[in-house]
Image: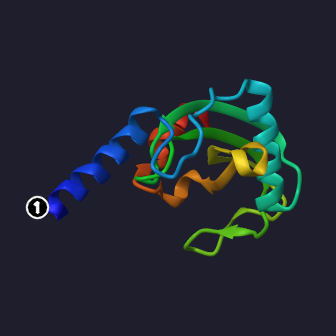
Amino acid sequence: MKTLVLMVGVLSTLAACEMDNTGASGESPARPFPDAGTVRSIAINGYQATRHQPPTSLRVGSVEQANAFIGLPPDYLVCVSTTENTVYSVYDNAGNLVAPAGVPFRQSYVMLVRDYPHLGGWASGVFRRVEEGKIGHIDMASVCPPSER
């Protein structure tokens, strides 16, 4: 009986944490998503951190709120595209040159944006090519459709 009373007390405490939107770990409530200028700045910083160079012709597309990783605060997935140059020459199956190195092409990414209060605000935790498939359980092609690439 004491175990049952203790379990009810623990569950009530957890429910109270969830009801006041602070979560079981005590983090602060979610802040509103940042404005377009901040999102663009996050995209530039995220691109530079992953590709080690500034982006060219950066375009920020749709934003989707999603819980990519279950159990964590809501994430925002942002479609981002930029112009890059091919690093290697591309050949078809017959050995014919399809695209020489240095040719510009559009590359699309999905950027996961999250509020990191302990780091001072909004930042990109993941920056992946759309072709890579998924972030968590979310298909990246649904976040960044062909019309936005």
The x, y position of residue 39, in whole percent, is 73, 34
In the orientation shown, which residue stands out farthest toward the right? 54
Q: Is residue 19 left or right of residue 130?
A: left
* Image label count: 1
In the orientation shown, which residue stands out farthest toward the left? 1
Looking at the image, can residue 84 be seen?
Answer: no
Closer to the camera in the image, 66 or 73: 73
Looking at the image, can residue 53 be seen?
Answer: yes
Q: Residues within 10 Å of mark 1 (few under 14, many from 20)?
A: few
Q: Is residue 112 left or right of residue 3?
A: right
Closer to the camera in the image, 76 or 4: 4
Q: Is residue 69 left or right of residue 13?
A: right
Closer to the camera in the image, 60 or 12: 12
The residue depicted at 17 percent of the width and 62 percent of the height is: 2
Closer to the camera in the image, 124 or 44: 124
Q: Quadrant of the C terminus?
A: top right
- Disc 1, SS: loop
Image vertical order of residue 131 relative to residue 88, above or below: above
In the orientation shown, which residue stands out farthest toward the front? 2
The residue depicted at 40 percent of the width and 53 percent of the height is: 70
What colour scheme was applied to this rendering of the protein? rainbow
The residue depicted at 45 percent of the width and 44 percent of the height is: 67
The x, y position of residue 42, in whole percent, is 77, 42
The residue depicted at 43 percent of the width and 41 percent of the height is: 17
The x, y position of residue 139, in whole percent, is 43, 49
Q: Circle 1 is placed at which residue position? A: 1
Q: Quadrant of the N terminus?
A: bottom left
Q: Amino acid at mark 1?
A: Met
